[in-house]
Amino acid sequence: MLTALKTPEMNWLHSVTVLICILFLGFMPFESIAIRSVLDRLLGYTEAPDYRNGVGCPAMEELTETMSYCDPSFVHITMTLDSEYLRGSMAAVHSVLRHASCPEHVFFHVIAAEFDPEVNPRVLTHLVRSIFPSLNFKVYVFREDIVINLISSSIRQALENPLNYARNYLGDIFDPCVNRVIYLDSDVILVDDVRKLWNVQLSGSRAIGAPEYCHANFTKYFTDSFWSDLVLSRVFGSRNPCYFNTGVMLMDLEKWREGNYRLKIESWMKLQRKKRIYELGSLPPFLLVFGGNVEPIDHKWNQHGLGGDNVKVSCRSLHPGPVSLLHWSGKGKPWVRLDEKKPCPLDYLWEPYDLSKPIRVSTTK
């Protein structure tokens, strides 16, 4: 999984090898337009710096021979990855590695769509490896057919992407030895050591941890038909639910599997197909199942809402207090606004982690 420090000659050889692999894939049964898109993406990214462990991390010679992703010393992070959010995802990975005290002990579980028209999982593996040659990662194929018939329409089409629901199936997708994972959306940037988040303990039977926002109007996340139904509205019982954002979660997959939480989430999605009880895609089922039973994590680990709301793109300021993670949840994404020359002030905090470089075609004759 881990590679030794590379010389410039090795970097050049690696780039050529990856390019040959991608070209080889071009002779396989993919659309030529998709192959050109992959090549454009590959050539449009610069290789990330080779981040290495700091003082106090296990010695490298011990890791290269014995470590697998089941090793308990790894910090496990999972993200979904598709062609639309690829640039944001690569920036998020870069930020994690840049601020990690032991970057070689971070393992990324990357979940890719089965039928992405531009980047299939095999090509995606080569692409990620070309950007992060020393990254510990594995690409998983998410079978969209297991959830597609459960998805209802949302207020924003992007929220209907089947990959948004992949987090419901992490307990099934990952090896049983992966019993704990940090879930991150593609539009985040970490500015702190991820191990600090990893070290948060989930007490009792709690299967997930996340920053909670109890001042938010919890009722707005469900329709009037939900609250007017005397049976449904009592679902929280004695729990005191608060809003939490599912874009940053610490998840205990052992408790998740034991609690059959996938089936519980799916049952609410099935009900939603019959009776409209919410509007916001994959978030409300999590609120219904876990609201009032979430391990509260410091708000600094999800300074969310920087992309505005789900309808209108607008600039937001940070919440008061320290910041460990910035999250451009909402409609506006920093890479889009920067490219359009219409950035919000906080978008400039995302820019240093961007590994995408424009391809400049010379017009000199």
Image: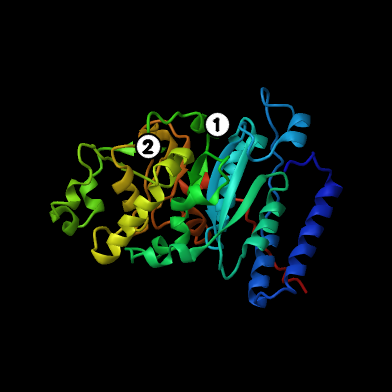
The residue located at (45%, 44%) in the rendering is 257
> Element at badge 1?
helix
Is residue 216 placed above or below 87 in the rendered structure?
above
Residue 32 in sight here:
yes
Question: The disc labelled 2 sits on which kind of residue?
Answer: Pro
**Disc number placed over residue 211 in the picture, else none:** 2
Horizontal side, residue 125 vs residue 317: left or right: right
Q: Which residue is the site of mark 1? A: 195
Contact (Cβ within 8 Å) of mark 1 with mark 2 = no
Q: Quadrant of residue 29?
A: bottom right
> Element at badge 2?
loop
Q: How many marks?
A: 2
Question: The disc labelled 1 sits on which kind of residue?
Answer: Arg
The residue located at (65%, 63%) in the rendering is 41
Q: Position of residue 124 (x, y in %)?
A: 64, 59
Q: Position of residue 288 (x, y in %)?
A: 29, 48
Q: Quadrant of residue 299?
A: top left
Q: CA distance from mark 1 to mark 2?
A: 16 Å
Q: Quadrant of residue 268?
A: bottom left
The residue located at (67%, 71%) in the rendering is 35
Q: Which circle's residue, 1 or 2, is located before the other in the chain?
A: 1
How many residues crowd around disc 1 within 10 Å: few (fewer than 14), some, or many (20 or more)?
some
Give the quarter of the figure containing the C terminus: bottom right
Q: Position of residue 218 (x, y in %)?
A: 24, 46
Residue 306 in sight here:
no
